[in-house]
Amino acid sequence: MAYESFRAFVDRLDREGELRRIRAPVATELEITEIADREMKSPGGGKALLFEQPTVSGRPSRFPLAINTMGSHRRMAMALGLESIDALADQMQFLLKAKPPVNFRQAIKLLRQGLDLLHARPKKVDDGPCKEVVHRFGGDPFSLNDLPALLCWPKDGGRFITLPNVHTLDPDTGERNIGMYRLQIYDGRTTGMHWQVHKVAARHGKRYYERGERMPVAVCLGGDPSHTFSATAPLPDGLDEILFSGFARKKSVELVRCETSDITVPADSDFVLEGWVEPGELRPEGPFGDHTGFYTPVEDYPVFHLEAITRRADPVYPATIVGPPPMEDFYMGCASVRIFLPIFKMNFPEIVDMALPAEGVFHNLVFASIRKQYPWQAYKIMHGLWGMGQMMFSKYIVVVDDDCDVHNTSEVLFRLCANTDPQRDTTFIRNPSDALDHAPTIANLGTHMGFDATKKLPGEGYHRPWPELARMTPGVKERVDKLLASISNQPSP
Ligand SMILES: [Mn+2]
């Protein structure tokens, strides 16, 4: 199911009892963060929040602000128009199973073709709601300061646009990429562009630099939340985010050409910020209270210059905050893992399930359960994951047997502690580390650690009998369920 606008999604959340409206004026400086942070840390992720009167420097903004719209398992599924994320994961699996690919590259190709067949291919249109109002610089003096962008944490370097879908093109192939890179607002028409060295947009930027050309960029806010999710999803490089968004929402995305460049953007966007990045131009960006839970320091990043802003007549400004976990992004990450698990399983059929617990803020901790067949298979899985896309950043990987629920952190820690001999069952490797990780001595370079918490086989040098986990038999469980039900049904005296 597709939403015709971000507002349509917010209205649906309201109808389903998933939204709290806040009518009183609330400051975009720190106050919205404090309210949203409490909500995101309440059980299950709380509710989505619609601030009807956000204020900017004490003055009411023209636009309402919605936050935590994807911050629960249910709302994340609703964002993609699903009852449960599982349906989409099953479809991914089906696509890959229809004609089993023999390698990763082929899988991506197959996936792309499969998505095309599902009518996910985008459609070009001449006009759309994102152009109901057009501001060009030199004409209507629209300023970035008119957006209710948040000053998230006290020591942040400024206001940040936190839920932007950044569109860039590969100048050689014309291939599009959409990523989510935070934008620090410097003034009315300039922002930072926080694409890190490992990101696709940074690669595009490098090509423009080599060609000596200015790089067109379009930043979309809002529209169908499916686009926003797709921008954050760890899609395999080369898999178009728009194609994926169309697949997820079961309706092809309508794309309209920007006013000032050849980039095409979803016509249902609430705001489109059009502009360019001058390759080579850098400016200090940050600090920013990041999803690691810590402030990232000031560093030089590219600069985004705005040329035009187009928008809906009645847009809703989408926002999120990051910081000490759990936050809204945890639920988005969970959905990604679930949806892309079939791709992992295709490469590693022994993988049963995977989880990235909130405490690990994505890159720090990965749990994988496997059906172990041969000695040291847990290490094969660790090395495999360390070689796959963004999984390369995984600081700690814990591999457990298939009878362990990786979504239950307590159960995984129990297995980790009980099943390992620290020296025998760990390995250290070198790999790139996440640019945001402050712990490595040298930025971007780190050691990673793997734990084999599976039960040990004789072939692994373990020659004592491995004990059996004490567990109740299924028959007893059912009998007791019935017994307890009958007791609770008895009328009280
Ligand atoms: Mn991409």
Image (cartoon, helix red, strand yellow):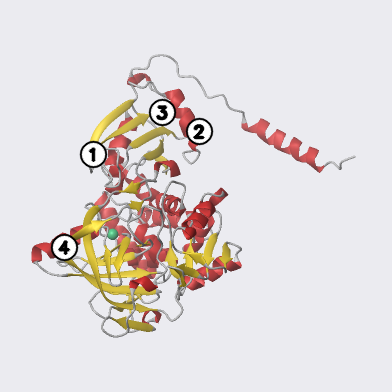
Q: Are marks 3 and 2 in contact (CB under 8 Å)?
A: no
Q: Amino acid at mark 2?
A: Glu
Depth check: 431 or 359 in front? 359
Q: Which residue corresponds to the image point at 9% horizontal and 66% vertical from the top-left?
A: 211
Residue picked out by circle 2:
411
The numbered mark, 4 or 3, whose residue comes first in the sequence reads 4
Residue picked out by circle 1:
431
| Separation of residues labelled 3 and 1 (CA atoms) | 24 Å
Q: Amino acid at mark 4?
A: Glu
Asked which quadrant contains residue 141, the reply is bottom left
Depth check: 65 or 53 in front? 53
Q: Which one is closest to the eye, mark 3 or mark 2?
A: 2
Question: Considering the numbered disc 3 on the image, is that residue within a helix, a strand or a loop?
Answer: loop
Depth check: 423 or 212 in front? 212
Q: Amino acid at mark 1?
A: Asn
The numbered mark, 2 or 1, whose residue comes first in the sequence reads 2
Residue picked out by circle 3:
454
Question: Considering the numbered disc 4 on the image, is that residue within a helix, a strand or a loop?
Answer: strand
